[in-house]
Image (cartoon, rainbow, N blue to C red):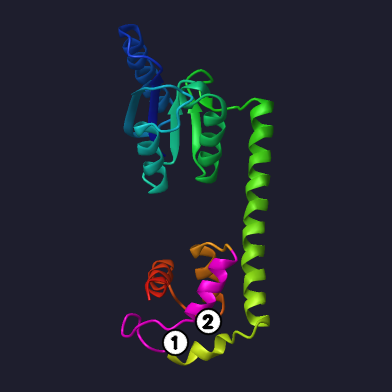
Amino acid sequence: MNAIIYCRVSTDKKVQETSLHRQKDELMALANKHMLTVVDCIEEQESGYEIDRDGIFRMLEFFSEKKAECLLIQDETRLGRGNTKIALFHQLQKLDISIYTGIQGGEIELSESDSMVLQIVGIVEEYQRKIHNTKIKRGMRKAINEGFDPSENLSNRHHAPGRERKVFPIEEVVRMRQNNLTFEEITTTLNGLGHPVSKATVHRRYKEFRKT
């Protein structure tokens, strides 16, 4: 596997700089032990409670772009502390990233309390997704019940994209905005009703309508 080494200390004192070098050396040894290919080594002097860290976003970019599949850290507190640590572990779980720690000499073993919190976070996120999807479905049903006919715009679907101005019911967009739906929810509703249109187009047409 390709791996990212992440080292962090919380201050810029000289003794902490030495700690960064020690972390890096120990994690390079850990990578060699498990035959991992290190593609980047990130070193930061930042608070573990802070989520807005350049190194963290650089690390997540590697994982999101599938350039690495494994994270090496000295211990779990190097990744973060408090809620920040839980949020980052949750994100790494979603990306299916393996985590190795120097202190455990292999794959991380989370504490029972951390594992429980991550399970709860996952359940909450799933129900938020269900609520979001249910809200969209209700918006679609309401639009149809109020007389909107999605088949009225199906005649143009065979045309190549971009050849002509997209046609969709702007009055429905206005009505859904008045019902506090987001542009993302409105776009999903329109697509479900037979109007293949992007969120950017919906937003632009809505602004044009408001101006006129």
- Name the side, left or right, on which 122 lies relative to 58: right
Can you say whether 126 is above or below 51 in the image? below
Circle 2 Cα neighbour tier, 10 Å, few/some/many (<14 / 14–19 / ≥20): some
Which is more toward the observer, 28 or 157? 157
Give SS at disc 2: loop
Give SS at disc 1: loop
- Name the side, left or right, on which 143 lies relative to 209: right
Q: Quadrant of the C terminus?
A: bottom left
Residue at the extreme top? 15
Where residue 81 is drawn, which disc sits there?
none
Amino acid carrying label 1: it is Arg
Give yes or no for residue 36 being in the magenta stretch: no
Where residue 194 is drawn, which disc sits there?
2
Residue 210 image offset from top left, x and y in percent: 42, 71
For label 1, the residue is 157
- C-alpha separation, residue under disc 2 versus residue under disc 1: 9 Å
